[in-house]
Amino acid sequence: MTVPEMLMFVGFILAAYSIVANDAIQTLGTFISSNSHRPWWILWAWAVSVLIAVLVWGWVAYDGDVSYGRLTKFPEPPGGIE
């Protein structure tokens, strides 16, 4: 694995972590509290499996574009990205 590939992988993991840490905490907390009669490890296994499925689907369906194609509607800056 080359350095740029490694950095891309680390960036993807950090982006995935920030999504969970920022946007899904309230939903995750509601899910856990409403299913408090189940063992904790089942709840976390389910939540992690859903997250992994969504991230893998997004990666495969959009060829690694973590923006899900949403950035294509913005024009490229003059001179391109170097």
Image (cartoon, rainbow, N blue to C red):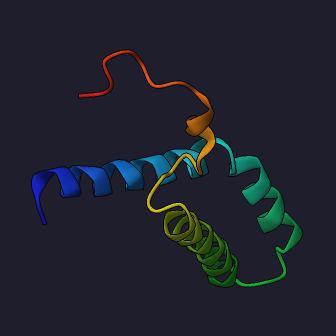
> Which of 77/1 is in front?
77
70 relative to 61, above or below: above
Q: Is residue 7 above or below residue 33?
A: above
Residue at 88% x, 68% y: name it.
34
Question: Can you give x and y, in whole percent of width and height, for residue 47 in the image?
Answer: 66, 71
73 above or below 38? Answer: above
View extreme (right): residue: 34
Provide residue 17's location: percent of width, then percent of height: 48, 51
Disc tally is 0
**In the picture, which quadrant includes the C terminus?**
top left
For image coordinates 69% across by 50% down, the residue present is 24
Rendered location of residue 45, percent (x, y): 61, 80
Q: Residue at x 60, y 78 (%)?
A: 49
| Residue 69 image point, x, y percent | 59, 47
Which residue: 57% across, 36% down?
A: 71
Please tell me which residue lies in front, 28 or 33: 28
Where the N terminus falls, by quadrant?
bottom left
Could you say which is closer to the camera, residue 58 or residue 27?
58
Residue 32 appears in which quarter of the rendering?
A: bottom right
- Say whether residue 28 is left or right of residue 72: right
In the image, farthest residue toward the front: 79
Image position of 27 (left or right of 15): right
Say which of 74 and 28 sits in front: 74
Residue at the left extreme, as displayed: 2
